Amino acid sequence: MTATGTAFEVAVHAEATLGEGPTWDPATGRLLWLDILNSRVHTYDPATGRRTLRHTDQHVGAVKPRAGGGLVLNLRDGIGLVDPDDTFRWLHREPVPGRRGNDAAVAPDGSLWAGTMRYDEAPGGGTLTRFAGDGTAETVLDDVTVSNGTGWSPDGTLMYYADTPTRRIDVFDVTADGRVTGRRPLAVIEEGAGFPDGLCVDADGCVWTALWDGGAVRRYTPSGDLDRVITLPVPRVTACAFGGPDLTDLYVTTARVGLPAPHPLAGSLLVVPGAGRGVAQPAFAG
């Protein structure tokens, strides 16, 4: 195992309350990321440094590109679409009092796997739901507390998932029709090392996970062995994703929520240049 403590750079110095959801959009050459609790969707162009900001009407847990242009959003009350002309419409609206959308990911078949959680983080109050491009919804997991990182192996035969309070990264087998079965632990984060939050999978099939209250990003091999740790100065590391033109730079989001004396970089977007080699992510088919 190798450890890196100072290899990161600051991509965007920010004070996001709950920075989350980094996603590389190859069509625009920009990184999408968000601040959940301030209802903000950010973009960052590493080639020019240009940044944009969009305010949403609700807390936003995830943002992903769409195949035909525009964005899909995992919002408090359901799944929303931003069309290429910048208009908003609901794909699936299902408000549940006390619950909001959280992390989400796009599967190899173009479906959106969107998680939810209760604001009070009540055990079992969240879900993981698969949304087809036409808005058809299928509940995958219905006993989730904080639905977080979701990702697929490069060949699409495995899916990884984290329900944060369990401290586990779980792995599923993916069936021919894109559904999942055979849930089992891939890795367990030891007590005192933080909790698994957002994750991504690299070209070698290794799983990178951000550690909330762990101040680090870890990489696990497909067999569950820990083989790399990138330590960071901020405790609340929330998610990670590969980006840049060659998908070799690891972007990491952070949070300052709940910290009485946050580190000056808490809430910033960080990047670890040349951390590895990512896999191009599909756009949502809707």
Image: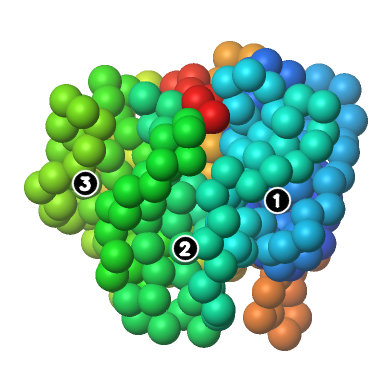
User: Is the N terminus in the top left, top right, bottom left or bottom right quadrant?
Assistant: top left
Residues at discs 2 and 1 in contact (Cβ within 8 Å): no
Evaluate whether residue 235 shows in this view.
yes
Which of disc 1 and disc 2 is earlier in sequence?
1
Other-residue count near label 3 (Cα within 10 Å), few / some / many at <14 / 14–19 / ≥20: many
Other-residue count near label 1 (Cα within 10 Å), few / some / many at <14 / 14–19 / ≥20: many
User: Is the C terminus in the top left, top right, bottom left or bottom right quadrant?
Assistant: top right
Residue underneath mark 3: 171
- Give the alpha-carbon distance from disc 1 to disc 3, as whole Å: 26 Å
Disc 3 is placed on an element classified as strand
Query: Which mark, by number, is residue 116?
Result: 2
- Identify the amino acid type marked 1: Leu
227 relative to 193 in the view: left or right: left
Q: Residue at x 68, y 74 (%)?
A: 257
Query: Is residue 142 shown above or below 129?
Result: below
Residue 198 position within the rendered picture, expressed as x and y whole percent measured from the top left: 47, 52
**Residue 264 is drawn in which quadrant?**
bottom right
Query: Which mark, by number, is residue 211?
Result: none
Residue underneath mark 1: 34
Q: Say which of marks 2 and 1 sits in front.
A: 2
Q: Say which of marks 2 and 3 sits in front.
A: 2
Residue 95 position within the rendered picture, expressed as x and y whole percent measured from the top left: 56, 67
Residue 76 position within the rendered picture, expressed as x and y whole percent measured from the top left: 61, 64
Residue 44 position within the rendered picture, expressed as x and y whole percent measured from the top left: 79, 34
- Give the alpha-carbon distance from disc 2 to disc 1, as whole Å: 16 Å
Which of disc 3 and disc 1 is earlier in sequence?
1
Which of disc 3 and disc 2 is earlier in sequence?
2
146 relative to 16 in the view: left or right: left
